[in-house]
Image (cartoon, rainbow, N blue to C red):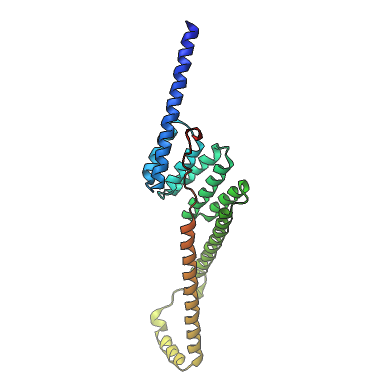
């Protein structure tokens, strides 16, 4: 009687596990379908339900992708961290680091993005996308640092008397005389023209940089979930 009870018990557990696996697989397929149709909210819900029934490295990764595509980048970072930490699959781990880097780029945390892409490349050194995004993230970080340095230069130094605000009334007469002198000085005209040319060059450079960043944002996508091929994959 005791052995019979154990047999029934284990048979029940086995059936329960099989049922949970089947339910998890069903939700996983639904999540893939919703993701591919760009209904990322529904995809997220389906992947979460799948994980409730059965733990899966792929579902953790796909859940991160669905969150990322809803522009909840901070949550996506945490999900990719979890995905990378628990999986033993080098491909999933590498892609998790890659997409984590993408999320950091969206958050404009370029140093962290660089570290994430580097982690991805340690696992998959031949990933051309990771190499390219790493180079772009480094350029973005450099540009950010240069802009910060320029902003620091433009900030007035309170201890420097030369940068103190001037008395408008006191300098009013001097400004009038200066304007008259500038009208008679051809060199001032040349300086003005040079300044205009420099401004035009600066504007063109900004347009190029903005266009480059726009292209970056378009290509910073690598995370479509791998659709289930058969029941045994899940």
Q: Does the image show residue 87? A: yes
Which residue ends up furthest to the bottom in the rendered image?
Answer: 184
The one nearer the camera, 214 or 137, is: 214
Q: Who is closer to the viewer here, 18 or 177? A: 18
Q: Residue at x 46, y 46 (%)?
A: 65
Q: Is residue 232 above or below residue 106?
A: above
Percent from the top left, x then y, of residue 74? 45, 47
Locate residue 42 relative to residue 81 in the image: left or right.
left
Q: Name the foreground residue: 128 vs 205.
A: 128
Residue 42 in percent (x, y) is at 36, 42
Q: Is residue 40 left or right of residue 87?
A: left
Instruction: Name the quadrant containing residue 176.
Output: bottom left
Q: Position of residue 86 (x, y in %)?
A: 54, 36
> Looking at the image, can residue 47 be seen?
no
Going by the image, does 111 lie left or right of 210? right
- Along the line of sight, which residue is nearer the eye, 58 or 226? 226
Identified at 42% across, 86% down, the residue is: 175
Above or below 69: residue 186: below
Give the residue at the far top of this rendering. Answer: 1
Q: Is residue 15 above or below residue 133?
A: above
């Amino acid at each position: 009687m005791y052995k019979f009870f154990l047999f029934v018990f284990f048979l029940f557990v086995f059936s329960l596990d099989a049922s949970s696996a089947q339910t998890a697989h069903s939700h996983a397929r639904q999540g893939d379908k919703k993701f591919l149709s760009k209904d990322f909210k529904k995809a997220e819900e389906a992947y979460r339900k799948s994980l409730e029934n059965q733990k899966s490295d792929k579902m953790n990764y796909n859940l991160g992708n669905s969150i990322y595509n809803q522009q909840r980048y901070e949550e996506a970072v945490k999900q990719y961290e979890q995905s990378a930490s628990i999986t033993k699959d080098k491909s999933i781990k590498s892609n998790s680091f890659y997409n984590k880097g993408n999320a950091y780029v969206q958050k404009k945390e370029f140093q962290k993005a660089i570290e994430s892409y580097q982690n991805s490349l340690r696992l998959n050194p031949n990933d051309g996308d990771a190499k390219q995004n790493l180079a772009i993230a480094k350029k973005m970080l450099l540009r950010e640092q240069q802009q910060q340095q320029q902003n620091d230069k433009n900030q007035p130094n309170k201890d420097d008397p030369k940068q103190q605000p001037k008395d408008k009334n006191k300098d009013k007469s001097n400004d009038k005389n200066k304007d008259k002198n500038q009208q008679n000085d051809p060199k001032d005209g040349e300086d003005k023209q040079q300044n205009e040319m420099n401004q035009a060059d600066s504007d063109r450079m900004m347009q190029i940089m903005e266009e480059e960043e726009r292209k970056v944002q378009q290509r910073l996508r690598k995370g479509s979930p791998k659709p289930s091929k058969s029941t045994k994959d899940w």
